[in-house]
């Protein structure tokens, strides 16, 4: 395999891995009815005038499948934490008891589950688009290398390998989505 083909495959693999990582990150934000500390990853808290990730000002735990507790490192941060959770628009209602913030995660309705499944599949489509873009860039690079002197059989072999890589990553997207769907639809 030529250096050009190897380089195109490496760059495509990196881009496709990033697409899968981003998909998994986005799917973690979609709650499936079970409490999870990662549900609050997107929450920003006003920490003395600076928007700060929640995990930098508090410990987030799940004592059971329906409850999230947020233990602030400073008691003065309890109100800003509640406000940050509400502003994140996650559909959660934080309760401040003066010591910790308690969030009860409500059961999901069938309609809400279907909406979350649609959102998950939309994220999957974004990942597929990223994978196709990586494939296109790799194929364009191989074609340009062919114009610059790469033998035709090397180019054809490289194109085949890029397609195999694309198929492998599209299958991975399907697996990740199927697992999330199962998680969302399980009552």
Image (spheres, rainbow, N blue to C red):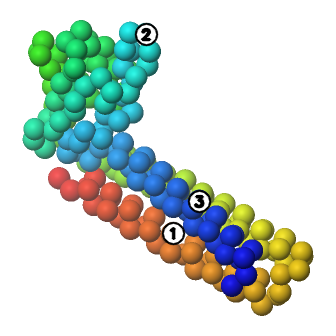
- Residue 153 in the image: state x and y as whole percent: 77, 90
Hey, which residue is sitting farthest front in the picture? Answer: 3
Residue 126 vs residue 23: left or right? Answer: right
Q: Secondary structure at mark 1?
A: helix
| Residue for point 31% across, 62% down | 179
Residue 15 badge? 3
Residue 171 placement (x, y as % from top left): 46, 72
Closer to us: mark 2 or mark 1? Answer: 2
List x then y, in percent, for residue 154.
75, 86
Q: Residue at x 15, y 38 (%)?
A: 62
Q: Residue furthest bottom?
A: 153
Rendered position, 88 above or below 178: above
Task: Report how far apart the C-alphas of labels 3 and 2 lie in the structure.
Answer: 36 Å
Say what secondary structure mark 2 lies in. Answer: loop
- Residue 107 visible to the viewer: yes
Q: Quadrant of residue 59?
A: top left
Q: Which numbered mark, 3 or 1, is in the foreground of this view?
A: 3
Q: Tag 3's secondary structure?
A: helix
């Amino acid at each position: 395999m030529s250096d050009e083909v190897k380089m195109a495959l490496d760059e495509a693999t990196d881009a496709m891995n990033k697409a899968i990582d981003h998909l998994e990150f986005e799917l973690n934000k979609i709650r499936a009815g079970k409490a999870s500390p990662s549900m609050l990853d997107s929450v920003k808290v006003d920490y003395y005038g600076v928007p700060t990730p929640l995990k930098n000002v508090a410990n987030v735990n799940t004592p059971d499948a329906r409850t999230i507790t947020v233990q602030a490192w400073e008691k003065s941060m309890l109100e800003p934490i509640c406000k940050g959770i509400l502003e994140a628009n996650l559909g959660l209602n934080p309760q401040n008891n003066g010591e910790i913030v308690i969030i009860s995660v409500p059961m999901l309705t069938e309609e809400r589950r279907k909406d979350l499944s649609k959102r998950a599949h939309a994220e999957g489509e974004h990942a597929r688009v990223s994978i196709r873009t990586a494939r296109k860039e790799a194929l364009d690079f191989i074609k340009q290398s062919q114009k610059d002197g790469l033998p035709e059989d090397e180019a054809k072999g490289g194109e085949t390998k890029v397609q195999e890589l694309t198929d492998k990553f599209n299958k991975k997207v399907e697996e990740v989505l199927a697992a999330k769907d199962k998680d969302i639809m399980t009552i």
